[in-house]
Amino acid sequence: MEEQEKKTSHTPIRRAYPGQRHTGRRYGQGQRKYSPPGFSAGFGRKDVSLGQAGQIQPKRDLQKTVPERSRFAGSRPPLQSRDGQRRPAYAGRPTRTGESAGETRQTESKRSGRSRMRPQQMRFHPSIPREGEFAFQEMPTFPIDIANENLKIVPLGGFGEVGRNMMVLEYKDDIIIVDVGLRFREEDMPGVDFIIPNISYLKGKEKNIRGIFITHGHFDHIGAIPYLIEKLGNPPIFATPLSRGIILKRQEEFPNLLKLEIHPIDKSKIEPISLGHFTVEAYHINHNIPDAIGLAIHTPVGTVIHTCDFKFDFTPVGDYPTDLNVFSKFGEKGILALLSDSTGVEQAGSTLSESVIMKNLDEVFQNTQGRLIVSTFSSLLSRVQQIIMLAEAHGRKVAIEGYSMKSNVEIARELGYLKIQKGTIIDIKDIDEYPHNKAVIICTGAQGESSAALMRIVNREHRFVRLHKNDTVVFSSSVVPGNERTVQFLKDLIARQGAKIFHYKMMDIHASGHAQVEDLKMMISLIKPRYFVPIHGQFYMLQLHAELAKGLGYTDENIGLIENGDILELNPSKINIIKQVVPANYVMVDGLGVGDIGEVVLRDRRMLAEDGMFVIIAVIDSKTGKVRGNPDIISRGFVYLREARELLSEVRKRAKYIVEKSASRADAEANYEYVKDNIRDKIGQYLFQQTQRRPMILPVIIEI
């Protein structure tokens, strides 16, 4: 093989597949396809036959090859004809010399007497194939044993939920991981700080982990690194400079951890990173944080495109647009699977550009005479850049408030991702030294968090800032599901103090960082993958994204709809889903404790939070088995003792009777647990009858 390569006159290029020889020609141009040495693509030979839907099948005497897919050999999913019947996209003969694929389709249509299908034109891009009409790209030829070898994709988070993104890709003894994120707790999880992925599947495989790829610096993609990196064997991390800076800044909060090995990714150059059987290329993508990347993951069975969180923004602020030619080139080479972000699939149309947001924010600046307080996500650095640029244009000074906001701005500024003129930024403690019409505050707290900067300002708990009647508060963010009540409460507090409010429902002052329906269609049409896998989102979002792909001609056989804990097996000839075989339950972080909070602890916390605690203390005479005096009662969060004397008196009587009846038996010492259970059951029933509440009952038996 090496000798053959030396004889070629062209410059060798990186091979996406082992054994693949470069001919200096591209697919789809009519040239001879290439295949590994000693194998044939099988075109025009007598020893191959056409199977169902034109699929080329090897005959029994040729078990050493798997012929490649072609434009005419079952390369597209079945389409929907006008009569409602599903039919193969094209199952005809190979094209003759000089005959185009379109002419062949017309010929076949005339011969069969069927009317030619006319799918609707796609609106979003004139050069993109029509809906249902694009073909899957050709897949290279592989040795026959590749058909029995699979690329495994194992989602440990982010599939069936928003956040906690973590995906494992495994081929033989090589593993790479994409993102290690967290999600914030739900309302019914009192005391829990974060939720992180369960990595039990990787236990015992730590030596096989070749690297972790970070797509961008949001906490739902990097937040679990401090908690899991050592358990994963401290593998190398590959990240862009901004993501690296945010990761290292967060690591400062965990000084006892080992030093991270982070390799920088230069997204301006699509350079391959080889890790075992994997070769990974990172490409630029637009999101609502700079330095976001998608991944082209080359494996022996094909190439997988991971879009990461993305949107198409052709007029971004502080960034440059995504190069669509990158996706077209990937599509021309043949893509095994597209793993595409589903978070914005419920929104029709295309995602708003940041330039539109900037224009509307400029109107707010022009019409505001007093002080501006703009609250947004701490990681939404493109929005921070917009506000700073507008403040400079309108002659205002800017104060940054909120720990995470300050940290991200500092990192982005040091790395050159934020362009700020000298003298624009001032300290928050000096804000009152400037006229209100010359000051802007950018702060955290757009989700109504009780400890965030905006809530402290509104509640008059901030050390340096008070809300004034002529202030204008701008919520330049959407409301995260579950935070509606807290955000509305915050708005009410602001309105009561006479300040003006602007939010995203009143005008376009926030743009999502996630692709919407037309953008998602564009991505599928540019990549033209063999298989489609929706990622990142609630299950309904994943399902809706799968339906979107079906509208473009894909079938269930070409779509991998998976959830956390499933295993998706891929190779050029099949896709297989093994359901719920990998532990993917929540691992909760509470303070320094990781994974020590389970459902039992949460249930007790919910009970304490909802109905309180009721402690009954009984002292028993070991000789007589009688209760000395009356049992003591401690109530917390259930009833106020001074206002429930009759209830407590009856509880004491009943508790004393239960204890003495049980303790008077000869084997009383061995049955104190039975006595406690009896108290819980009977006193619990009585309290529920009287109050319709079920406090946590804690019996304490003391023998003297």
Image: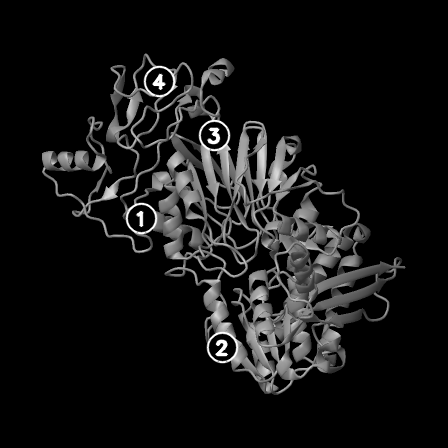
For the residues bearing labels 3 and 4, Cβ distance under 8 angstroms: no
- The dot on residue 363 is 2
Badge 2 element: helix
Residue 570, placed above or below residue 122: above
Q: In screen coordinates, is 140 left or right of 484?
A: left
Residue 578, placed above or below residue 548: above
| Mark 3 residue type | Ala
- Residue 500: x, y in percent? 55, 83
Q: Which residue is mark 4?
A: 40
Mark 2 vs mark 1: which is more N-terminal?
1
Mark 4 vs mark 2: which is more N-terminal?
4
- Distance (Cα) linking label 2 and label 1: 36 Å
- Residue 677: x, y in percent? 71, 57
Mark 3 vs mark 4: which is more N-terminal?
3
- The quarter in which the C terminus is drawn is bottom right
Badge 3 element: loop
Mark 2 vs mark 3: in front: 2
For the residues bearing labels 2 and 3, Cβ distance under 8 angstroms: no
For the residues bearing labels 4 and 1, Cβ distance under 8 angstroms: no
Q: Which residue is mark 1?
A: 127
| Mark 2 residue type | Glu
For the point 39% across and 59% down, the residue is: 350
- Badge 1 crowding class, 10 Å Cα cut-off, few under 14, some 14 to 19, many 20 or more, is few
Q: Which residue is mark 3?
A: 16
